[in-house]
Amino acid sequence: MTDNTLVGYITEVNGAEFLVELLTEKDGVNSVISFGDRQVHVGQVGSYMLVKQAGPDILVLVESMWVQANAGSSRRMLRVNPLGSFNEDGGFHRGIPHYPVTGAELHLVADAQLKAVFANFEAANFSIGSLSSFPDINVYMDPSAFFGRHAAILGQSGSGKSWMVASIMQSTLKSMPNAHIIMLDPHNEYSQGDSSGKPVFPLDNVHHISAADMEVPYWLLPFRDLVDLLIDTNEEHASLQIAFLRSTVMELKTKANKDIDIGHIHIDTPVYFSMAELFEHFKLVNERTSNFGKASTPLTGKFDSLLIKLESRMNDTRYDFLLAPKKRTSSLSLPDLLRDFVGMGENRAAITVIDLSSVPFDVQPTVSAQIARMAFEFNFWNPRCREFPLLLVCEEAHNYISSSEDSRYNAARLSFERIAKTGRKYGVGLCLISQRPHDLSETVLSQCSSFFCMRITNPVDQDYIQSLVPEAAKGLLSSLSSLSQGEVIAIGEASPLPVRMQVNLPQPPPNAQTIDFYKMWAATDLEEVDVDTIVQHWWQNRH
Ligand SMILES: Nc1ncnc2c1ncn2[C@@H]1O[C@H](COP(=O)(O)OP(=O)(O)OP(=O)(O)O)[C@@H](O)[C@H]1O
Ligand SMILES: [Mg+2]
């Protein structure tokens, strides 16, 4: 065991990295030395070390290691990234007040010193896992940065994202009982619990609601989204249809709300109007003729396509939650909708899980756009928004916050981009979860200040993630493809240091268990699958 922690000297200093020449066996430093109660591989990629010179010690992360042959001798070299510095009383800060100069010493870092850094935020008791290399060191995150400045959890399918989300939310409920979280759950993974039926979140803390039951009525849509829903903008008469839609909606909104004290109604005011009347209005104008039926008017027949589209949507029961709401049929139902939505309704809850699997796949972007919009508007108009911060957790975010040019995604992209850009000021945070970071809106992703990267083997996605995160984490990210299930590299403001860690197991886990083909196919005592039930579910559009 050594007390001597010196292992090398700095030979070159850049803004974002230092080069180090390691000492050799000749200087009494082996490649593997025992230090504290463990064996240390000196200069291992992804390990932490200390740079010492007059002034504060600098904590660095090893990015790469190589041997440089030089006139018969060979030198072991390291490239390290500075992470922050320790002050005299041992406190750790990001940022480096003074850069070292060549000749500065590189030292091993003691466990106790590392432990202190990871315990920086211990008081908030928001621990999401432990160091992969030292399982007994707990990693505490800064919850204010995590929730308030947007976070992204990225990794390929099966890497453990949903389990991590469940684990984080469970830990949040324990240490922050007054949380306000809205979760978009496209695969209904968070309401069913584990195989024994134990719910993922304690039942008195969660409100499960299916998007279809919640009803996100058409009259909440801003005019722009209503146009996307009803009008094909490539159509010949699109501009005429848009103009007529605008004046009709205005007229119907004013008429339906004349007895309610709303003040000035504008086209985007979220107040009730009748869809049936809108349809009749268009039908009438489309069919109207002049001169006792002998001549057509300039509007005759111009709305054929709109009417067909609208009628087919209105007859499709899967769209009822949007176009034929049963509960939300008056402007006065809006407060209740918002209460349900943020967990202040009959079922008071810290987490509202909205099951999106109950609505057709092609309208999921429209629904999530409205959910994001409601979250933002809620706090935008909330005079006490600073006391009521909200978090929107977006599972499978690439399905609706898409970078695709397709106009179907426009509304959702704009809604989420608004939160990404200005949500921080009104206390609306985002947590994005995706297996396809490439397909996510770049604007939204680039506003995230914390990244949690799980296993990714695809080189294109790896490069994309490298380009998103700060320089200092490059050393750790090179190991993205070697992470195991539930292992994550945490980078950014919420994490005291870029760190490779094992996420705490959720208890119980979400209903996202990987199906065991072998076990099922090898079993001999399974019950026969009931095909009639499958057909019934398919017909009735339910699970
Ligand atoms: N922390 C963990 N420790 C051990 N095993 C884990 C851990 N997290 C996840 N797993 C295993 O990995 C499987 C997949 O996890 P999960 O459903 O969270 O993946 P995912 O990244 O959300 O995938 P997808 O993108 O397809 O939704 C789980 O069923 C579980 O068996
Ligand atoms: Mg998942």
Image (cartoon, grey):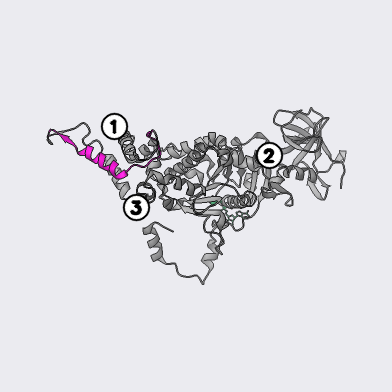
Badge 3 vs badge 1, beta-carbon distance below 8 Å: no
Q: Residue 142: x, y in percent?
A: 66, 42
Q: Residues within 10 Å of mark 3 (few under 14, many from 20)?
A: some
Amino acid carrying mark 1 in the image:
Leu
* Dot label at residue 240: 1
User: Does residue 66 appear in this view?
Assistant: no
| Residue drawn 57% across the image and 61% down it | 198
What's the amino acid at mark 2? Gly
Q: Earlier in the sequence, mark 3 or mark 1?
A: 1
In the rendered image, residue 42 lying in the magenta stretch gets the answer no
Q: Quadrant of the C terminus?
A: bottom left
Q: Amino acid at mark 3?
A: Thr
Mark 3 and mark 2: span between their CA atoms? 53 Å
What residue lies at 55% left-to-right and 65% top-to-bottom? Answer: 519
- Extreme residue toward the bottom, this view: 525
Q: What element does badge 1 sit on?
A: helix
* Label tally: 3
Corner quadrant of residue 15: top right
Rendered position, 32 above or below 72: below
- Tell me which segment is drawn in magenta: 264-291
How far from the left and from the top, in percent, is residue 237? 28, 33
Q: Earlier in the sequence, mark 3 or mark 2?
A: 3
In the image, the residue with mark 3 has its CB under 8 Å from the nearest atom of ligand 1: no
- Location of mark 2 (residue): 475
Label 3 to label 1: alpha-carbon separation: 29 Å
Q: Which mark is residue 317?
A: 3
